[in-house]
Amino acid sequence: MKHESVLLEEVIESLKLKKNSIVVDATLGLGGHSKAILNEIPQGFLYCFEQDSQIIEEAKNKLKKFSNYEIINQNFVLIVDELKNRNIQTVDAILFDLGVSSPQLDNAERGFSYQQDGPLDMRMNPQNEKTAACIINNYSESELVNILFKYGEEKYARSIVKNIIKKREKQQIKTTGELKTIIQESVPMKYRREKHPARKTFQAIRIAVNDELLVLEKALKKSLELLNKEGRLAVITFHSLEDRICQKIFKQVSQIDSNLKKLPFIPESKKPKFKIIGKIRPSKVEILNNNRSRSATLRIVERI
Ligand SMILES: C[S@@+](CC[C@H](N)C(=O)[O-])C[C@H]1O[C@@H](n2cnc3c(N)ncnc32)[C@H](O)[C@@H]1O
């Protein structure tokens, strides 16, 4: 699959970069957004986070003409700690482009895709211990149902999990192909004709393997505290669960506490520190050219 950075122009415009801006790309991936950011900040510096060491080599190639950047092979939840280690207390712009990158999806061995048969892995950081196989073969029935409902909003969670349990009692479930077959056999024919029936379960297990929602919530809160005055944070989400977290946090930090609204004046210390700049969806042309962008939403917030 050809890799295209989603909402590229919109991201660059939204971040309001200056030539000497200090920027964080929290999700380097193949470096498409990073490259475009580096073009805008010849006297600035870019810190790129990427938890997948296998992808970093590919990204380096894309960024080889630049020297004003550093790749940090860490989870973005460590954003504040890693920047502190480099004596950086504040930055001018931060980007999160969530989810997996195309090399992760395309490589069957990584186990992210129900389109190809591979080991049930799904770890974005191959050094982590917990794989999709650990979850599928060891979690209790109620834990699995909970994951499928909560992280996949999968209405057939109960029957899928029943069949997972039945199967694993005989032998361990080891591959994405086996899981896909179990899902297909657990849902009604009508559901099979809609979007791929394995889509939601795979999303749910991936979120659980990588602890994606908890990590995102923590990282967004920490990142906001890093922003300079007029600094901007932009987040591209790909499903409603991520988007809801982003929306909730942006709302919290940009609104006045409802109890204070009754006061004749709002003390300076209680005024919101951020304002919401907006929400952007990909154009029809982008969706036509890059199907992955169809579910993307870009949200932007600015430190006042
Ligand atoms: C959608 S891709 C980014 C694509 C990139 N913006 C580009 O233009 O090429 C998301 C990347 O973020 C990485 N990632 C996801 N969650 C992460 C986390 N918590 N910490 C660090 N990297 C993460 C994934 O490994 C993946 O490579």
Image (cartoon, rainbow, N blue to C red):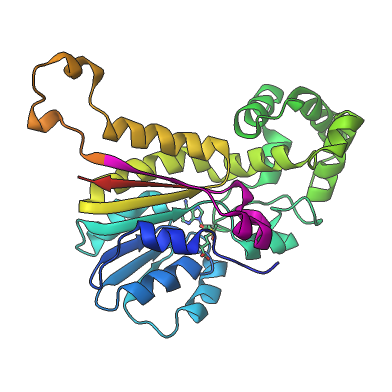
As drawn, the residue found furthest toward the front would be 284
Q: Is residue 280 magenta?
A: yes
- Residue sitting at 52 percent across and 66 percent down? 53
Q: Position of 220 compared to 198: left or right?
A: left
Q: Is residue 153 magenta?
A: no
Quarter containing the C terminus:
top left
Q: Give how far across and how far down residue 202 sits, in percent.
A: 70, 43
Q: Give how far across and how far down residue 31 sits, in percent.
A: 49, 69
| Rendered image quadrant of residue 222 | top left
- Residue sitting at 31 percent across and 63 percent down? 23
- Residue sitting at 51 percent across and 81 percent down? 61
Quarter containing the N terminus:
bottom right
Compare residues 239 and 131 and report the one nearer the observer: 239
Magenta-tinted stretch: 275-297
| Rendered image quadrant of residue 182 | top right
The count of marks equals 0
Q: Give how far across and how far down residue 90 sits, in percent.
A: 21, 56
In the rendered image, the vertical position of residue 12 relative to residue 162, given as above or below? below
Asked whether residue 201 is in view, the answer is yes
Q: Position of 121 compared to 83: left or right?
A: right
Q: Give how far across and how far down residue 74 sits, in percent.
A: 42, 59
Compare residues 168 and 100 and report the one nearer the observer: 100
In the rendered image, the vertical position of residue 130 relative to residue 269, given as above or below? below
